[in-house]
């Protein structure tokens, strides 16, 4: 893991390097509380209408700001103006629908995958080689006791949480479990309702990276998941397909000062 991306070889584009080396890149930022017209101008039509449909101004501002920052980050890495970066949705692997699939980089058309997450005023973007990547972020906050006995945990995860002291240690551990789970679910692309969460064990006692197995509709996929130290206020996990094509270095891009 590095906070500074390597220089490309002469004549090698950033996209070529990412694919050839199996790299992943992660950016994070604080979302704005008010919508900036310059951010709004970068959105696509679907994103614009999605923002218009949000009832709370702050929710809309965070969504617009995150999508604009994602374009600027990707544009800077790929050496393109943000106006030439377009985000869309993949076809849903579960039902084939086009309105709710995982995000994708539409323009430029490159063999790269993207994932986005927002929580409590934070935005996170992940980019990686290949067709799948997943990132999830959750603000660290108290968790209702009923969650610890709910249907989202495996027996091993419940046992791990029960062994911890009530309060912050248990809450922090739950958020690590949850972000590991959801990062895989987002990478697979079938959503929470398409996954038996109580069968997706996150190996919470292991510091990671961990090897997780996702099973859905007869399909089994394998993932390498690692926890990311982006902020003391956040639990963040990144999921990449397990295999040589995605074993490259992870580059972290902190918020601009």
Image (cartoon, rainbow, N blue to C red):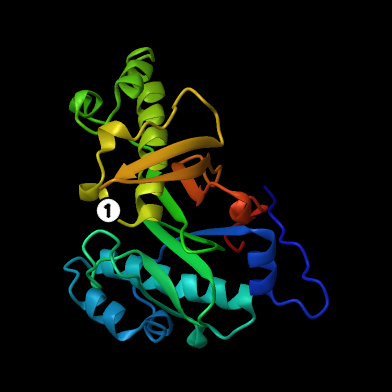
Front in this rendered view, residue 206 or 55: 206
- Residue 85 image point, x, y percent: 49, 82
Residue 119 can be seen, yes or no: no
Q: Is residue 128 left or right of residue 13?
A: left
**Taking 212 as reference, is 17 above or below it?**
below
Residue 103 can be seen, yes or no: yes
User: Extreme front residue here?
Assistant: 218
Q: Residues within 10 Å of mark 1 (few under 14, many from 20)?
A: some
User: Extreme right residue here?
Assistant: 10
Q: For the C terminus, which image quadrant?
A: bottom right
Q: Which residue is mark 1?
A: 191
- Residue 233 image point, x, y percent: 45, 41
Q: Is residue 171 left or right of residue 71?
A: left
**Taking 203 as reference, is 98 above or below it?**
below
- Residue 200 image point, x, y percent: 34, 35
Going 29% across and 20% down the picture, which residue do you hit?
Answer: 155
């Amino acid at each position: 893991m590095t906070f500074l991306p390597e220089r490309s070889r002469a004549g090698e584009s950033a996209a070529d390097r990412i694919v050839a080396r199996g790299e992943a890149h992660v950016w994070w930022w604080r979302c704005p509380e008010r919508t900036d017209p310059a951010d709004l101008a970068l959105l696509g039509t679907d994103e614009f209408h999605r923002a218009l449909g949000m009832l709370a101004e702050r929710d809309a501002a965070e969504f617009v700001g995150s999508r604009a920052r994602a374009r600027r980050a990707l544009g800077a890495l790929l050496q393109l103006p943000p106006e030439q970066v377009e985000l869309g949705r993949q076809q849903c692997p579960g039902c084939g629908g086009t309105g709710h699939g995982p995000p994708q980089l539409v323009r430029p058309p490159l063999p790269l995958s993207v994932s986005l997450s927002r929580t409590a005023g934070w935005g996170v973007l992940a980019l990686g080689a290949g067709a799948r990547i997943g990132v999830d972020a959750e603000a660290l906050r108290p968790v209702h006791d009923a969650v610890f006995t709910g249907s989202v945990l495996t027996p091993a995860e419940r046992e791990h949480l029960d062994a911890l002291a009530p309060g912050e240690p248990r809450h922090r551990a739950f958020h690590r479990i949850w972000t590991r789970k959801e990062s895989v679910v987002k990478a697979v692309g079938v959503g929470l309702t398409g996954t038996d969460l109580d069968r997706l064990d996150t190996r919470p006692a292991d510091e990671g990276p961990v090897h997780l197995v996702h099973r859905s509709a007869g399909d089994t996929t394998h993932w390498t998941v690692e926890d990311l130290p982006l902020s003391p206020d956040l639990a963040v996990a990144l999921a990449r397909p397990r295999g040589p094509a995605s074993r490259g270095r992870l580059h972290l891009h902190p918020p601009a000062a």
